[in-house]
Structure formats: C-alpha cells, structure tokens
Image (cartoon, rainbow, N blue to C red):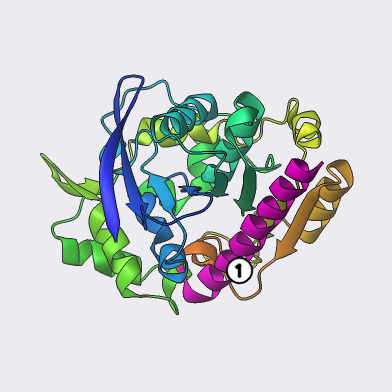
Amino acid sequence: MTETRTVPVTGGGLAVREWNPDAAGRAVVALHGITASHLAWQELASRLPDVRIIAPDLRGRGRSRALPGPYGLDTHADDVAALITELRLDHPLVVGHSMGGFVTVQLVRAHPGAVGGVLLIDGGLPLQSAAATPEDATALLGPAAERLRMTFESRSAYRDFWQRHPAFADDWSDSIERYVDYDLIDSPDGLRPSTVPEAMLEDSLWLARDAGVVDDLNAWPHEIPLLAAPRGLQDEPVPLYASDDLDRWRSAIPRLRPRIIEDVNHYTIVMGARGADAVAAALRDQLASLTTNAATEVRS
C-alpha cells in the first residue's frame, strides 16, 4: 500500500510518497540522489513490506521541482526536518543515497534531535573529487549533468536512453522503467528530465565541504553504517569511495561502519536487486540495533 501527500516547507509543498503507511515500529525516511526521485526506493520498499518508508522528492526534483531556491544541503535538511515534524515521526531512521547521504549528515548536524539513526549509501562523506565551481560540477557528474539539458520526443525514447546506460546493462527492471517514466516532464521543447539544472549545480558544490563533519559525526551517539559501491556512475571500476578513503574516514570517525557491497555500481546499489537486498538487510539490522538501544536506555 502506498500514499502520496504534500508536506508544507518554505516556499511551497514537498511531494512525498509513503510505502506501508500503517506499519508499526520506527519509520524510515529515505533520501534520494542528486538527479533522482523518490522512486529510487521502490526495490527497497518491496523488500520491507512491514516497514513504513517515507520518501520525498527533494527540492528541485520530481514533483517538488517547483519549489524555489536557494538549494543546498542546509535547505534540504530543513525540508526533511519539516517533513519529520509534519508527519509526527518519532526519531525515524534516515537512509540517504548519494546526495541523500550528504543531506542525512547535514540533518544530523543541524537537527540531531529529530533523527533516531542513519544509514549512508555511497554518499555522505566529503568527496575529494567534488566540485568547486559549476564547471567542475558538470564535469564531475558527466552524463548525469548533460542529460538535464536534453529533450526527448517520447517516453519510449527516454527509456531507450536509460536502457543503453552502462549502469543498467544487467539490471533493467519494471521498477527502473517506472522511475524513468516518472522523471519526464513536459516543456515547450519536448519531454525533459524533471531535475532543475540549477538545483543540481548548486547542490553539487556542497559535496566537498568538510568543515566540522568529523566533529559533528563523532558527537553522534550511534553507529554510522556506510554501504559503498565498488563501481561508479557509469559502471566504471572507479568508486566514489575507494578502500583507502573508507579506511581514512574510519580512522577519523570511530563509529563509522563502512562496507563495500560487491557487484553493484552507484545506481544499482539501491535500484538493482542485489543492491536492494543488501540495503534492506542493513536497514533491518540498523532498526533492530536502534530498538535494542532504546530498550537499554529505558532500563537504565
């Protein structure tokens, strides 16, 4: 069962999808990547029919594209905090993929009392390769940035574009097709992706900022699991976080628990079957850990 709603935030309404809205227990708030939408979480939701999963289209994406700037991780974190308050969520587990991971970290920094736990997926920790200028951002995101400037004559043409994408060569599915169809909007020039290019550029400039991240995350009282993909956005064998990067961050943040999920890339770690299996298992482990911690705190 799913429900859609609009949550009031600064400047308008944030589009939100809920899976299993009547499920008991701690809710999960799922935050997507920089040019994605809430439908990136379909495979995860299908594996967790007993978990309430709440996934917004972040500002400037999907059906939240009309929300105005400024963008940036601080704005997104405030939007998610407003969502948590509006839906009266009791310390949800927040899971973030790619840019959603960075929003998750910013949420912990700015609104720590709103969050019960976190799960980061191929994102959240500052990237050495991240952009310093809009030109760098376009280069960093490559085809993902170029796609936002393209138009398509039909939904079929857009599906063909994505089916040729190297990240999905072995993982095309009905859920990915729904994700692709949802991404298109009408424009005077034809169908185009829904992400606002200015939102993507502005947000990408935050991905290398590390001022205070180590101190803030070391102040977080819970474990911080991070699932990483060994392959990148184009299925290339160059990940966002190499093993050496993860070791460095693990040394700096003792509660960080990084793990590489084999045989996935940056997209399929959440949108493919193998990745969704791993994420669902990690999410269940994290929910169980948070329940145990809460019971221990009550007893003490």
- The chief SS type of the magenta part is helix
Q: Is residue 195 left or right of residue 151?
A: right
Asked if 13 appears above or below 181 in the picture, the reply is above
Along the line of sight, which residue is nearer the eye, 163 or 268? 268
Which residue in the structure is indicated by mark 1? 281
Assign a secondary structure to mark 1: helix
Residue that appears at 30% across and 27% down = 67
Three-letter amino acid code at the position of disc 1: Ala
Residue that appears at 37% across and 33% down: 59
| Quadrant in the picture for the C terminus | top right
135, above or below 278, in the image: above
| Residue 68 position by quadrant | top left
Question: Residue most toward the front?
Answer: 299
Q: Residue at x 37, y 22 (%)?
A: 69
Viewer-nearest residue: 63 or 30: 30
Q: Residue furthest right?
A: 251
State yes or no: residue 171 in magenta.
Answer: no
Quadrant showing the N terminus: bottom left
Magenta stretch containing residue 299, yes or no? Answer: yes
Residue that lies at the very extreme toward the left in this rendered image: 188
Return the x and y of residue 13 as percentages of the image width and height: 28, 29
Residue at 73% across / 63% down in the picture? 259
Q: Is residue 295 visible to the viewer in this orientation of the structure?
A: yes
Residue 119: where, in percent of width, then height?
Answer: 63, 51
Residue 219, placed above or below residue 230: above
Magenta residues, as a range? 272-300
Please state if 122 lies on the left or on the right of 81 as rendered: right
User: Based on the displayed image, in which of its 4 quarters is residue 5 positioned?
Assistant: top left
Q: Quick check: 226 above or below 12? A: below
Residue in front for this viewpoint, 274 or 239: 274
Q: Is residue 160 left or right of residue 231?
A: left
The image position of residue 50, as x and y in percent, is: 45, 64
